Image (tube, rainbow, N blue to C red):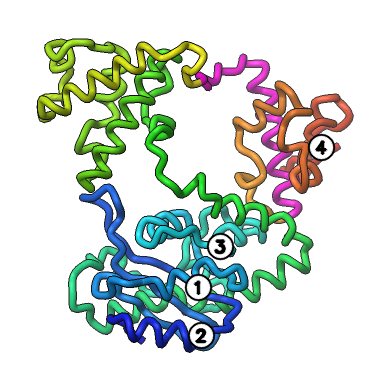
Amino acid sequence: MYISDEAGLQEFVDAIAGTQLLAIDTEFLRERTYYPQLCLVQLATEDASAIVDPILIHDLSPLKDILVDDRVVKIFHACSQDLEVLFDAMGCVVSPIFDTQVAAAFLGQRQQLGYGPLVEIYTGVHLAKAESLTDWSKRPLDPAQLRYAEDDVAYLPGIYHQMMDELVRKGRLGWVLPEFEALSDPRHIEHRPEDAYIHLKRSGSLTRRQLSIARELCSWREQEAAAHNVPRRWILSDEVVVECCKRAPTTQERFLRIRGTEQLSKKSVAACLAAIRRGLDADPSTYPEVHHRSRPSAEVESVIDLMYALLRIESDKVGVASQLVATRDDLVDFFEDPDSSYLMEGWRKDVVGADLKQLLEGEIGLTVKEGRIEVL
């Protein structure tokens, strides 16, 4: 069902009233804008499916109501971008959610399993990829495009049931639900200009005072990009922001010596200089913390290698992607202070945390038998 008007959307929402499951996918564009342009919303219950056209439908409030309904589980595959797009388009945080990509990693599949392979594993259906580079903003959409879009949700309700049965049978449901809750945490979805500097590339060499400048400059850039709805790199690239933080120019002449600033208007140059000054003048107690990770010594690296081998063994044993359990940085943190590590909490402690502590205390070891590493 292709829905292109408000009446059709309301009729579909009324028809699926009482459903406990709703599979969702989105198609969007964001290459030339700050806010992603929502082009399609694909929906499926166990009994019905629809493709909603938000380019032609201006009032999506009937859909918003079901997206925030606590009684309806929203099923996604790799949901992070979809949640952000729906938040920008409708101003709502979708919950509760079930992400089949995350669930797959808890059920023995690789961590970032694609939707096509997921469908093939659970249904035996091989999906075509012919429309993967489609410009979904162009109208009209042909039947092949609509069929491709519908396939992105059609199999999710059935896969959800299979996964839920498997998660319950293996005792993993309590492991995965907190991961879903974290994904739909508003702090991960909302745009906070004051936090934009956290995502600044190549900022690892900056001092705390330079990060104070980055916080102010990135906040200004974020607000400018949002106001004009253009990519933030069109305002100032990350490389230019980092260079501004390092040089900290306080005059227009010195600022414009930095390559990549010449396209800015006089008003924008003045705003950048003001942001730099705010960063320089900030109270040192408010400077962002520096999280530079020093490189471990060769001896410690060898221990981390041993810990990583144990992580792989225990992850394979329970059938959970090792990256979901811990990263190499997590292992370094564990080596430095095991008791404060989150690997000593909840299911991660059961899977690997307790064994890692025993390894570091010399209570267990690793050996090779028949070409495989085993725990002693």
Q: Nearer the viewer, mark 3 or mark 4?
A: 3
Q: What residue type is labelled 1?
A: Ile
Mark 4, other Cα within 10 Å: few <14 / some 14–19 / many ≥20: many
On the question of residue 130 being in view, the answer is: no
Q: How far apart are marks 2 and 3 (CA)?
A: 17 Å
Mark pair 3, 1: CA separation: 10 Å
Picture residue at 28% right of the left edge, 81% below the top: 4
Question: Which residue is at a point 71% across and 30% down the rendered structure image?
Answer: 306
Picture residue at 54% right of the left edge, 54% below the top: 184
- Magenta run includes residue 298: yes
Question: For this view, does 41 lie left or right of residue 184?
Answer: left
Q: What residue type is labelled 2?
A: Ile
Q: Main secondary structure of the magenta part?
A: helix
Q: In this view, does 112 lie above or below 144?
A: above
In the image, residue 210 above or below residue 321 = above
Q: Residue 16 carries which label?
A: 2
| Residue 130 percent coordinates (x, y) | 30, 71
Looking at the rendered structure, the secondary structure element under dot 1 is helix
Q: How far apart are marks 3 and 4 (CA)?
A: 35 Å
Secondary structure under the numbered disc 2 in the rendered image: loop
Q: Name the residue under label 3.
A: 95
The residue under label 1 is 66
